[in-house]
Image (cartoon, grey):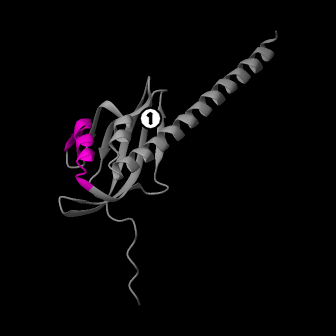
Amino acid sequence: MAPHGLTTIMAMAAGLVFGTARAAGDEDSRIVGRLDVEFQAAVKANDVSTIERILHPDMILILGNGTVVTRTQLLQEAREQRINYQQQDEVPGTQTVRLYGGDTAVVTALLWVKAVRNGTLLDKRVWFSDVYLRTASGWRYAFGQASLNVPDPTPPAAAPK
């Protein structure tokens, strides 16, 4: 076979491999993105079984103030329904899923939390990054980090002239 023909065949094969890998990556991104939204809904509903299914056994969450929250603590909080949520939702259009290799994904989004905890109203927005790992039983949420409260993105009304 002429070198030019071999080059063409190799380029076509690389395109097929890249296209297949990209399609698999796109599907993984969709799966992880949906899983993160499902996790936020489970937290909002204090749905212990769904939270437990999604969390990696070694999961930890680090809050913007430096507090470390373990999987056990998150599950206990949901069991005891310590927080009554009205909102625990990703702000539409803010979610980004990035894949690193074939087994790690990072979800970043702006989360609106409105809830009552110990009689105190919380109404805040935080940016978070959630790290998911592919395991033998599927994608699991292994590490999270949330910012401190960020200002409401809605600009104030202009003063009348």
For the point 69% across and 27% down, which residue is it?
Answer: 15
List the single residue furthest toward the top.
Answer: 1
Q: Which residues are magenta?
A: 67-83
Q: Name the amino acid, label 1.
A: Ala
Q: Position of residue 6 (x, y in %)?
A: 76, 14
Location of residue 37 with respect to 140 vertically, above or below? below
Q: Position of residue 4 (x, y in %)?
A: 79, 17
In-front residue for pair 121/103: 121
For the point 56% across and 33% down, which residue is it?
Answer: 25
In-front residue for pair 106/159: 106
Residue 105 is one of the magenta-drawn residues: no
Residue 75 is one of the magenta-drawn residues: yes
Q: Position of residue 44 (x, y in %)?
A: 35, 53
Q: Is residue 36 left or right of residue 22?
A: left
In-front residue for pair 148/112: 112
Q: Secondary structure at mark 1?
A: strand
Q: Quadrant of residue 112?
A: bottom left
Q: Is residue 99 left or right of residue 131?
A: right
Q: Is residue 31 left or right of residue 18?
A: left
Residue that carries the numbered disc 1 in the rendered image? 105
Quarter of the figure that contains the C terminus: bottom left
Location of residue 63 with respect to 143 vertically, above or below? below
